[in-house]
Amino acid sequence: MNGKNQERDVYVAIADPTRRKLLRLLADAQELPLHELTAQFQMGRTAVSKHLAILKEAGLVADRKIGRETRYRLNAAPLQEIKDWVSFYEKFWKEKVILLKNLLSEE
């Protein structure tokens, strides 16, 4: 990543377990404020905010201000790229398992 304005890679964004948990929390709710998200972790607001910023740069999280509060919501569309990538390998392995079963049943 060369520039600060460049979008962050979705794969990099979901590589961290904390960010994956944030995505899960946001998937289970329509919107959540920072203080509710922070309550789910053993880290401070600043650390959670940094994780949310990475998710936002990857397009996975959107936010909006309501007064002094920032509320976050999931944008799952960028996850389609990962789903497509995993689906290819899922098909690959299913075919390999079928071949192996066929080989084993010939004996």
Image (spheres, rainbow, N blue to C red):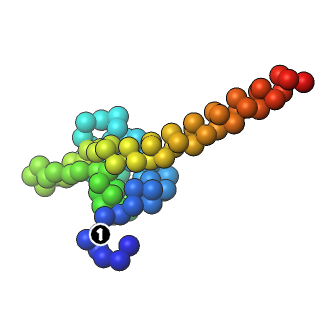
Of residues 20 and 10, the one nearer the viewer is: 10
**Which residue occupies 30% across, 76% down?**
3
Of residues 71 and 20, the one nearer the viewer is: 20
Q: In this view, does 70 lie to the left or right of 23?
A: left
In the rendered image, the residue lying farthest to the left is: 67
Instruction: Give the image location of residue 74, x and y in percent.
Output: 29, 44
**Which residue occupies 57% across, 38% down?**
90
Classify mark 1: helix, strand or loop: loop
The vertical placement of 63 against 98, above or below, is below
Q: Quadrant of the N terminus?
A: bottom left
Give the amino acid at mark 1.
Answer: Gln
Instruction: Give the image location of residue 57, x and y in percent.
Output: 30, 61
Instruction: Give the image location of residue 91, x and y in percent.
Output: 57, 36
Residue carrying label 1 = 6
In the rendered image, the residue lying farthest to the front is: 106
**Which residue occupies 35% across, 34% down?**
28
The vertical placement of 21 against 68, above or below, is above
Of residues 32 and 36, the one nearer the viewer is: 32
Instruction: Give the image location of residue 6, x and y in percent.
Output: 29, 69
In the rendered image, the residue lying farthest to the bottom is: 2
Residue 49 visible in rendering: no
Residue 4 visible in rendering: yes
Q: How crowded is mark 1: few (under 14 residues within 10 Å), some or many (20 or more)?
A: few
Q: Quadrant of the C terminus?
A: top right
Q: Is residue 21 left or right of residue 107?
A: left
